[in-house]
Amino acid sequence: MDRSRTTVLRTGTQILGTIAGLATAVSALRWLWKHAWLPQRPQGNRLAERYGRGSWALVTGAGDGLGKAFAHELAECGFNLVLVSRTQAKLDHFSEALAPLGVAVRVVCADLSDTSDATYELVAAATRDIDLAIVVNCAGVTIHGRYADIPTATVRNLIDLNVTTTAMVTRTLLPALLDHAAATGRRAALLDVGSIVGRFPWAGTQLYGASKAFVDHLTVPLGHEYRDQLDVLSFQPTVMATAMAAGTEPAVITITPQAAAHAALSHLGRYTTSHGHWRHALAAALFRYLPTELRDRVLFSQALAMAGAERAKERAG
Ligand SMILES: NC(=O)c1ccc[n+]([C@@H]2O[C@H](COP(=O)([O-])OP(=O)(O)OC[C@H]3O[C@@H](n4cnc5c(N)ncnc54)[C@H](OP(=O)(O)O)[C@@H]3O)[C@@H](O)[C@H]2O)c1
């Protein structure tokens, strides 16, 4: 090879290397901005300005865990709340705890796995006379184990709650969100809670994963359909220290529901999908780049361990 060709090759390689290095640096900075910087910032003023100070947010699954954390943070931002969940006593107790924040609170006690029209009518009735700006679909259940071992009643219940109710609550309340945008000139928001499990075919939690993939595919397109009015966030956390995950959580990726909710809200209006907290985003990135065979093996054994913990919780009542 003559000298000039060698020089051209070397220069070309250097340029490509520089471009690849810059692209990697930009990706790393964007990742740090999203997962390390934004979740450290207070979000109250931004959210209140964007969606309307003193407007209302409805949160399902608000009696406990992540839904409760979302509701609490939204109340701290000044939003009035409609809390929807199954256990009246938990909702009442939580409403009392919110009193010092000075926001109005309504509670709707409903079993959201009951997919009859009456359930969604109850939810709609609670929002008819308010300026509804934000909906957080958070109520959900999980199940782990080999599919043939999962009782058929559990299969139905999970689909009813995670799939049908997410779709129906969204369909029921979307017109009110669009009305808010039209009346105020501000944006409305839909935050649907999925899971990292919806991101990959995941042995040992196939049904739950399929339901959360549904949530993702329902949510993201709405951001395009209503791009002038609606912010959507398909939120896919990993493991949080809640009743759902109790006894199953690997410590290294377990965060509080408060930290998860805060990270998700810092992404609302900025992204359409998010794993939220940096620990969860890192776990998702690791899973994505693991060779499929290895990932399947690791995740399946993890899911079976979770199945064991869930059965133990059931036996303990
Ligand atoms: N925990 C995790 O590690 C994790 C990870 C990824 C995604 N997620 C998702 O995050 C969401 C919240 O999970 P979580 O961990 O906060 O769960 P959680 O601690 O079990 O709380 C769930 C809340 O939803 C309510 N709920 C459950 N079934 C209901 C029903 N049929 N009708 C009405 N309300 C019902 C519960 O009501 P009661 O108060 O009556 O029990 C509770 O208030 C779920 O969608 C879940 O899939 C959780």
Image (tube, grey):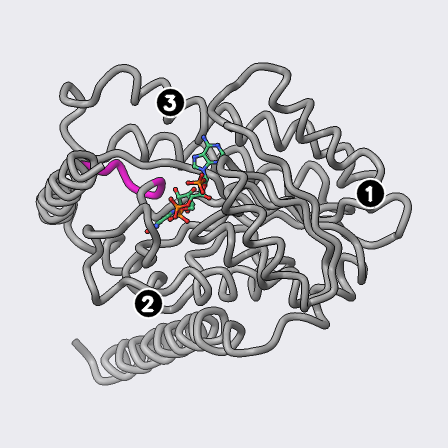
Residue for badge 2: 279
Which quadrant is home to the N terminus? bottom left
Residue for badge 3: 157
Secondary structure under badge 1?
A: loop
Report whether 262 appears left or right of 53.
left
Q: Which mark is first along the chain, 3 or 1?
A: 1
Q: CA distance from mark 2 to mark 3?
A: 31 Å
Residue for badge 1: 130
Report whether 63 appears left or right of 182.
left
Ligand 1, by image quadrant, is: top left
Which quadrant is home to the C terminus? top left
The residues colored magenta run: 198-203
Of badges 2 and 3, nearer the viewer stands 3
The CB of the residue at mark 3 lies under 8 Å from ligand 1: yes
Farthest residue toward the right? 183
Three-letter amino acid code of the residue under disc 2: Arg
Write down the quadrant of residue 173 in the picture. Answer: top right
> Which residue is found at the position 14% from the left and 22% from the top?
149
The CB of the residue at mark 2 lies under 8 Å from ligand 1: no
Give whichever of 308, 220 is nearer the camera. 308
Secondary structure under badge 3?
A: helix
